[in-house]
Image (cartoon, rainbow, N blue to C red):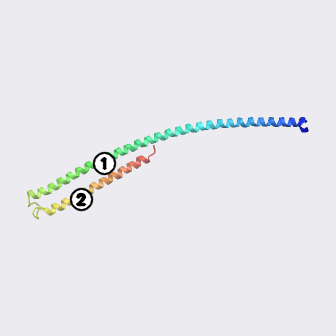
Amino acid sequence: MIALLNWRVWAALALAVALAASHWKAYSMGGAEYRAKMAERNAELMAEAATASEANRKTEQAMAAKLRKAQDDYAKMQKVNAGNALELARVRGDFKTALNSRCTANPTAPGCSDGGGRLERKLLGECAGVVVELATTTQRLADKVIGLQRYVGVACSPP
């Protein structure tokens, strides 16, 4: 208790309190400065994210438009292919009709020597059918490959 009567103890205690207060003030001001810097940085990052999001949205819309165009082109190609297949079937039918009518009208015509030329007509008709099926399948596969190549070209091209 006697030490409390000494002025040096009181001076040391006052100095310690003053130092603690000044250090606390510096610490709290530094935290506020750091929070202000972090708020500024967060605002910058949010602005960058919004800009990047907008750019990504535009890129996505451009790619979606390219995809729709590729799909429309493929649908048009399929319609053309279906029309070609119908035309090919019509030509095949006309060919079979021509084969059948030639020997029916004139059994002595060349190629009609086996009593109406049924064997040749049947053979030519079968060959024509196989060629038509082969052409249809080939055209369908070629259109599919072309469509897929266009799709890949559109989907993988830079915006």
Determine the residue positioned at 53% across, 38% down.
50
Q: Quadrant of the C terminus?
A: top left
**Coordinates of residue 82 in the picture (x, y in percent):** 27, 49
Q: Residues within 10 Å of mark 2 (few under 14, many from 20)?
A: few
**Coordinates of residue 71 in the picture (x, y in percent):** 36, 45
In this view, the residue in front, 157 or 38, is: 38
- Could you tell me the amino acid type at mark 2? Val
Q: Is residue 151 above or below residue 117?
A: above
- Could you tell me the amino acid type at mark 1? Gln
Q: Which mark is residue 7?
A: none
Determine the residue positioned at 37% across, 43% down.
69
In this view, the residue in front, 6 or 31, is: 6
Instruction: Assign a secondary structure to mark 2.
Output: helix
Q: Residues within 10 Å of mark 1 (few under 14, many from 20)?
A: some
Q: Is residue 41 above or below residue 94?
A: above
The residue under label 2 is: 130
Residue 3 occupies which quadrant of the picture? top right
Determine the residue positioned at 89% across, 38% down.
1
The residue under label 1 is: 78
